[in-house]
Amino acid sequence: GVYMDAYVYCNGREIGRHPYGYTGFALDLTEVVHTDGRTPNVLAVKVQNRLPSSRWYSGSGIYREARLVVTEPVHVARWGTYVTTPQVEDDRAVVRARTTVVNTSGASRRVEIRSVIRDADGRTVARAVSTAPVAAAGEHTETHQLTVPRPRLWDFATPHRYTLRTELRVGGRSVDTYDTPFGIRTFHVDPEEGFHLNGAYTKIKGVDLHHDLGALGAAVSTDAIRRQMDIMKSMGVNALRTSHNPPAPELIRVCEELGIVMLVEAFDCWRTGKNPYDYGRFFDEWCERDATEMVCAARNSPAVVMWSIGNEVPDSTTTAGLAMADRIIDAIRAADDTRPLVIGSDKYRRLPAKGSPADLMLAKLDGLGLNYNTAKSVDALHQAYPHLFLFESESSSETSTRGTYQEPERLNTGENHTPGRRATSSYDNNLASWTMSGEYGHKKDRDRKWFAGQFLWSGIDYIGEPTPYDVFPVKASFFGAVDTAGFPKDMYHLFRSQWTDEPMVHLLPMTWNHEEGDTVEVWAYANVATVELFLNGRSLGTRSFDTKTTVDGRAYLETTEATGDDKTFTDGPYPGSYTSPNGSAGKLHLTWKVPFEPGELRAVARRDGEVVATDVLRTAGAAHAIRLTPDRASAAADGRSLVFVTAEVLDRHGVVVPDAGHPLSFEVSGGSLAGVDNGRQESAERYQASTRTAFHGKALAIVRAGTRAGTLRVTARADGLRTGTAAVRTTRAASRATTPAPDFAPDHPAPRTYPYADAGYSGRPDTLPAAMLDGDPATGWSNGFLKAATPLLPAFDGARAEDWVSVDYGRTRAFDRLEVSFTVDGGHSLPAAAEVAVFDGRGWRAVEGARVEWATASDTPTVITFDRVRGSRLRLTLTSRHPGRPQGAVRISRWEAPAA
């Protein structure tokens, strides 16, 4: 894995080139290395990664493991074993082991080939031996058929693996051994019956993941990969699509160990690129070799169940693309003919014309992955292409920010463009033009037995593609069910409620800190039918899901109400709402409207009258201490093992403070910092630093173990808070890394210029708070936004009920007057009320004696006078005169607060 366009030199001589950044390669150094034992050998890799070369963060340079492999002249070829299980029964499994032997010596050799299969406990369960001549400078392929009695199957819950040990002997001497892990399992995907593993029907409960590892960037780490996939597994995930490239071997191994099936994908483009310098430059020369490498590197894994020839490939629906597809398909099937071939596509939201390239492409494939298709388009494709199995290669694409909530009453709410507040709502209701809510995707998948399943876009936020904000310092996507630090968002719990059986209930908002007088819309995700909500011990009522049944007889939980989530349904009992084939509609969450009061909010889920799950939220007080929690109790002292330490800012009672944004400083002894994160998509802080600002009360320190056994100790400090510490035992390792980790310096925030304008919400990128202070009456701040229609939802243009703006003057001064010019036009009106507060160094407090003289014309001053106060900031809270209506937004073109 070298990203990308790598040239390799040994002792000054170019020995090879490899353009694609996501496939491995090997080069023979035998003829160019010095072997006298005195002359040093120099290996150099030059990378010509011209930018932009990727739609997402790719990393650059050598980011996967590099190895020096030394063999005897007679040896097993690279990727020289191919293991299949053509017959699997309860009492026996037939294992076919094909071995390719290379002879680089100058003479023909008679080679004895031994195959031994051992189970996970090391017991030999089958063996075979044969002898074959291998010509000089040639190769030979030998196939052994072995029988494993009473096989232990590789499955989701019990991912048993075997090891094939291949030994080559020449003249009675062992010259090579080669271990191949594999699993025994059956699977099939049927266009009418869906996905089956070992004969059992199941849905593909998948996620799409790009290859970055958050704060670690693209550099491969088995510990980081395992943590990501453990978190995904805890959400109920049983499948991974490698988006949109062949994976690192470490990822394949982790999925094998966890029981997660894989769709391995080849390319994001073919000849026609999506960026000026992406893979399209190399496709014609390299596509067969890269497709073959992808397959050979992964074909022995029991986790891999499908090959994808590409994602949203522009060429795939062109005449020229048909021949391109044939080249990739032929290369894949030559290397492995045991798995179905698919493509992930956004090109089939309407039926293609018969005989068109898009139509002819589907004749070449076994399955079709759909990106963001409506339920009606899915049904139409199923009827038109009965030979194809269908699944959703990208579902939802809903965006959210951990701990941010906005307008739950709206199916599609607007983005907040205020600098420093670029976040999106976690009520499953921030949707771009192509996206669909997480609930919609579940219902569409659930209701169709023949639909193989879905891959959520995306399981984890990733670096790059900063959707829906493409502006500095936003550097990550908002699509994930989990943020880049590995902290679950509410979407994680929605999917857990649909994909897991262990009883659970989850409340959102995730915190219980609100303003006095607020009425909070509280949701509960649960996989239990009945949930009762308590506020400070008082029952707020029980809500229940109905138990419904799909047309093929599978039970599920859902409310019964019009959801308004699919305008393509124009008739039936719920026009404008997604309606199941059984005639029902509903939501996958329960709802209460709760007048806020501080204290404890508790959800109690009951089954047959018995409490089986709870979730508790408590109002947090002032920040008091830091708590550090490592993800493991011990690690190997090998200089590579990683420990992920969660830092939380707590009040005196141990409750996480949801608005805590303290700069945390990390120190490590017995190891080093590998990176820091907090999951915030809009952040200019460096990942490689010794400080990180808490985001919604949390941050993450990634710590690398040292090379001495003992104790790895992590300390976190912040001004005014009790210091947090954590210790992890480190044990002696068999091998150690040779590259020392760098020391990271603190990351200091950029200085702020004053006066500084802020707002709770800005509806458009050209109506930001700073425009109130620029002296230009043509510019200004506005909270108005328009959400365009999507394939599912109508356009929305309605005012928010309340918003605030503020100005920080950087120093304490006296105020007694505020002049604000409001715009009145077709989309804006004067507010119904305007309330002024001052920040006195400890908090906001309302001014006294406020008197408002409303302007009589647009963009002329409304004057608010009040008793003289001292402070450094003024805040104006504005209530809409027409909430929810197009003309009810508020706009300020000018703000002036003269010193008293």
Image: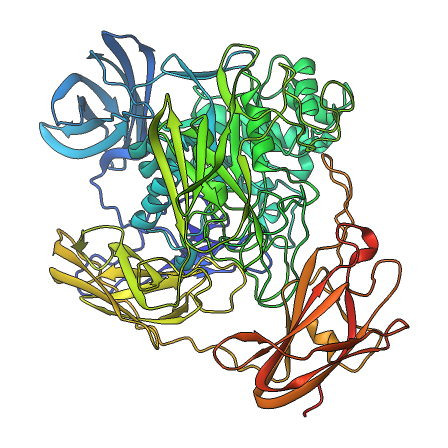
Number of dots carrying numbers: 0
Q: Position of residue 43 (x, y in %)?
A: 33, 60
- Residue at point 68% right, 20% down? 381
Q: Position of residue 701 (x, y in %)?
A: 33, 62
Residue 865 lies in what quarter of the image? Answer: bottom right
In-image side of 740 versus 328 (left or right): left
Q: Position of residue 267 (x, y in %)?
A: 55, 40
In-image side of 39 versus 778 (left or right): left
Q: Nearer the viewer, residue 816 or 791?
A: 816
Q: Is residue 12 visible?
A: no
Q: Nearer the viewer, residue 296 or 718?
A: 718
- Residue at point 65% right, 16% down? 583
Is 745 situated above or below 326?
A: below
Q: Nearer the viewer, residue 664 or 320?
A: 664
Q: Quadrant of the C terminus?
A: bottom right
Is 868 situated above or below 560?
A: below
Q: Is residue 445 visible?
A: yes
